[in-house]
Image: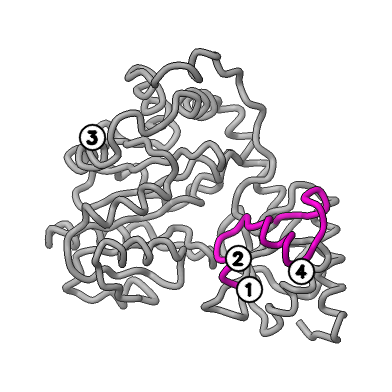
Amino acid sequence: MREAFRHGGALGAAMRRFGGARADWLDLSTGIHPSPPPLPPIPPVLWHRLPEAEEEEALIDAARRFYGVPAGGAIVAAPGSQSLISLLPHLAPSGPAAVLSPTYGEHARALQAAGHAIVEAADLADIPAETRLVVLAHPNNPDGRRHDRADLLSLAARLAALGGLLVVDEAFMDADPRQSLAGDAGMPGLVVLRSFGKFFGLAGLRLGFALCEPTFAVRIRERLGPWAVSGPALHLGAALMRDAAGVGQLRAAIARNAGWTRDAIRAAGLEPKGDAALFALVETPQAPGLFEGLARRHILVRPFAYRADWLRIGSAASEAEAHRLALALRAALDDKGIDP
């Protein structure tokens, strides 16, 4: 059962297992902002012709300002950060790859598919000295762990001296960019990944970025090939990242939603963990029963095959949704007299 829910957003699988129509469900299984901003109009011609170079340049310029990438750093746009996760292991130094674990499972799957042996490290201090490729998420998914920026830069410098690479997946950084390495893009041995869809609530747009030094950017672009990002995605991405007022409103809304959601978790006698605004982690021996109890009430959260005592809960979009979550959590705990 848990394999069907190894990624968030598996609402179809949940409906087949627990019934109900799509409209009945509250999907809190992802870390995607549940309230996207109004979309600017898309010129119809963008659906008709291939993207122009000027349109991609406009997106890159907007991304440079939005992420704070310095002039010496390069930016590559891609059809979602997942495509970059799958691609980068083929460009990275050969040999074992250290992955700060537990984390987003696609990193290890992509590395193994490219022939890398995986070394799991619980912390930065546990990374073997001879390792030339390190991958970590920041803040980490699913536990929201963050690292000191100076420690990450020191690691990147050490790897660069070995001809190696540090890949930092900042997919959940936009909501609260403390300790981001985007401003250090261009440093040798460092690649920072950013996801447009999570913060803007537009995951279906499939847009992501690699922030890196220019020669490595050329290698990524060669792998992606021409027209990697659609014209509508180029247009919407540039427009929304340029809207400073809209970005500020999104950050405020995400913080408000996170507060409602964490209060709902606490109201059920559980403690939310992690320093990420778009999701919270719950650790309890009763997690499997809670997942089932919530699903029977048509609320989907994210279980983990490798940690049966974890549930990740995404942000509610309103106080009403948070209240529904709190009631369902309490009811699920009461089903069998579960002590949280």
How far is disc 4 from disc 1 in space, using C-alphas?
Answer: 27 Å
Report the magenta residues as a range. Answer: 1-27
Label 3, on which residue?
A: 72
How far is disc 4 from disc 3 in space, using C-alphas?
Answer: 45 Å
**Kind of residue at badge 2:** Phe
Label 2, on which residue?
A: 5
**Kind of residue at badge 3:** Gly
| Disc 2 + disc 1, Cβ < 8 Å | yes
**Going by the picture, which residue comes out furthest to the front?**
16
Label 4 residue SS? helix
Give the residue at x 46% y 67%.
Answer: 103
Badge 2: how crowded within 10 Å, few (<14), some, or many (20+)? Answer: some
How far is disc 1 from disc 3 in space, using C-alphas?
Answer: 47 Å
Which mark is on residue 1?
1
Residue 304 to residue 190: above or below: below
Label 3 residue SS? loop
The answer to which of marks 4 and 1 sits earlier in the sequence is: 1
Label 4, on which residue?
A: 266
**Kind of residue at badge 1:** Met
Give the foreground label among 2 and 4. Answer: 2
